[in-house]
Amino acid sequence: MLLNRLVPLINVEDLDASLDFYRNALGFTVENRHDMNGKPIWALIRHGDISLMLNRPEETDSDARRKRPSYGDTLLYFYVPDAQAAHDELAERGYTPGPVEEQAYGVAEFTLRDPDGYELACGSLLGPQEESSFEDEDDD
């Protein structure tokens, strides 16, 4: 089976709040959206080659996800050129990212929660010798 692309879909309580977060915090743009009765119920957002679908089902309760410990469920992992710079920019704009930590696997990273408690990680490689290991992987 040949897979071409992965576009995660996450269910959210308030699509407007989620759109605000992903646009303002991370720089996503809305590529497509569907409204029902004047309220958005689905959107495809994009940032460069990264796509994500946001969906508002009839009933969604994100309280349990908001209370989970870090790395307790699905995590969306974004690579950034400089984790510390990304962290500082988010903090300056009023978001509350976790601390930047250097991991044994050669990445500096921090986490951030979206309005529905989905955990996002932003990481950058620590060593220039490892840079190509994430950028030039084969498309097998």
Image (tube, rainbow, N blue to C red):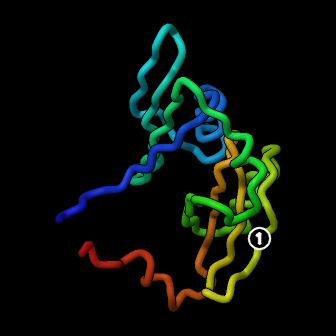
Considering depth in this image, is 130 or 72 the residue closer to the camera? Answer: 72
Image point (56%, 63%), residue name: 77
Q: Residue at horizontal 78%, vertical 47%?
A: 95
Locate the N terminus by quadrant: bottom left
x, y percent for residue 2? 18, 64
Q: Which residue is mark 1?
A: 100
Q: How many marks?
A: 1
Q: Residue at the left extreme?
A: 1
Name which residue lies at 68% across and 63% down.
72
In front here: 119 or 137? 119
At 76% from the left and 76% from the top, the residue drawn is 101
The answer to whether residue 138 is above or below residue 120 is below
Is 60 above or below relative to 78? Answer: above
Q: Residues within 10 Å of mark 1 (few under 14, many from 20)?
A: some
In terms of secondary structure, where does tag 1 sit? loop
Residue type at tag 1: Val
Q: Position of residue 33 (x, y in %)?
A: 42, 26
Q: Is residue 114 left or right of residue 39?
A: right
Rendering coords of residue 44 (x, y %):
43, 36
Quadrant, the C terminus = bottom left
